Amino acid sequence: MKRFFLIISVLLMFIQLKAQETYTVNGQDLVLKTEVEGELDLLWNIINNQYRYFVRTSDGNIIELTNTKDTYNNYQEEYKAVLAELTSGSTFDMKKLSLTLFELRDFLDKYNKTKDSNYTSNATFDKIQLRTAIFGGITNHPFVDNPENIKTTLIGAELEIFGTSDIPRHSGYIQLRNTFENNDFEFKTTEISLGYRLRFIKTKALNVFGNFTFATLSFTSAQVPDLNNLPATVKESATSFDVPLIFGLGADIRVSEGHFITLGYNELFALLIDNQSNFPIDFTLGYRFNL
């Protein structure tokens, strides 16, 4: 089960934000994203773990931008010659132009502007946006020794950080959770965590996502055996920092613009800490909204 979720999560990380189309380039069918549209278009994608960039001319011809090495391991910078020919007559200096998405996008935006005074870049430069959530639920503390499989309540809050998209596919989060002890299981914790979220189903009405919590700072309190006075117990407190790599699932259900009911099935498994034999139960229900 762990291997299945890990494989799915890794595959989903490569899902991209922008729309993709299939093009035939030199007899090869390639799925490419459109980054710049104008007199010259910029297309790109990650293919076989390699960034590949293409320019599409106004007549629909697609030319790949390459930077191969010769027998002496020197870069040939063929992309500069291609761009020089396509932009002949311009005064752009390409000596320091790198074969990267940011620099190619900036270069073609500037060129397209010289060809059309009304040209407006459609490339998106991310700015930080925030979304917060409050939630409550139950947990059986999947990573804590809990022989009787006791469930306790929890509450929490979260700050989600993302780019320009109203419905982000990729985001980061800072989360605060507090669990409560009861008479049958005298264990409680306050936890601050950092994580990454990927929405692999993203529609206006419903988003389904995976959570990847990679760092936690925990403050715990528990009843433990008093070794000097068995079978009595004593309360002990501890603070710990961990890199557990915890996986969970969640969903946001839209109720109005920028407002969502959020569901979570958290702490399914972790790569670097063990589940303590109980089937994981960690469910939350909450309310998420844009700031």
Image: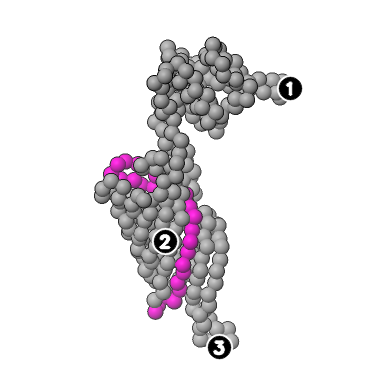
Residue that label 1 marks: 72
Label 3 environment density (alpha carbons within 10 Å; few <14, some 14–19, many ≥20)? few
Q: Nearer the viewer, residue 221 or 113?
A: 113
**For the residue marked with disc 2, what is the amino acid?**
Pro
Mark found first going from the N terminus, 1 or 3: 1
Q: Main secondary structure of the magenta part?
A: strand
Left or right side of 218 for 70 = right
Task: Look at the image and say whether residue 186 sits in the magenta stretch.
Answer: yes
Up the image or down, 122 lies above or below 169; here it is above
Residue that label 2 marks: 280
Residue 13, position as x, y percentages in the image: 47, 42
What mark, if any, has residue 229 been given in the picture? 3
Answer yes or no: do the residues labelled 1 and 3 have beta carbons within 8 Å? no
What stretch of residues is rendered in magenta? Answer: 183-212
Q: Residue at x 45, y 72 (%)?
A: 188
Q: How was the colour assigned to the protein in this rendering?
A: one colour
Residue 26, position as x, y percentages in the image: 50, 16
Q: Residue at x 45, y 41 (%)?
A: 127
Q: Residue at x 51, y 86 (%)?
A: 232
**For the residue marked with disc 1, what is the amino acid?**
Tyr
Residue 1, position as x, y percentages in the image: 45, 52
The quarter of the picture where residue 159 lies is bottom left
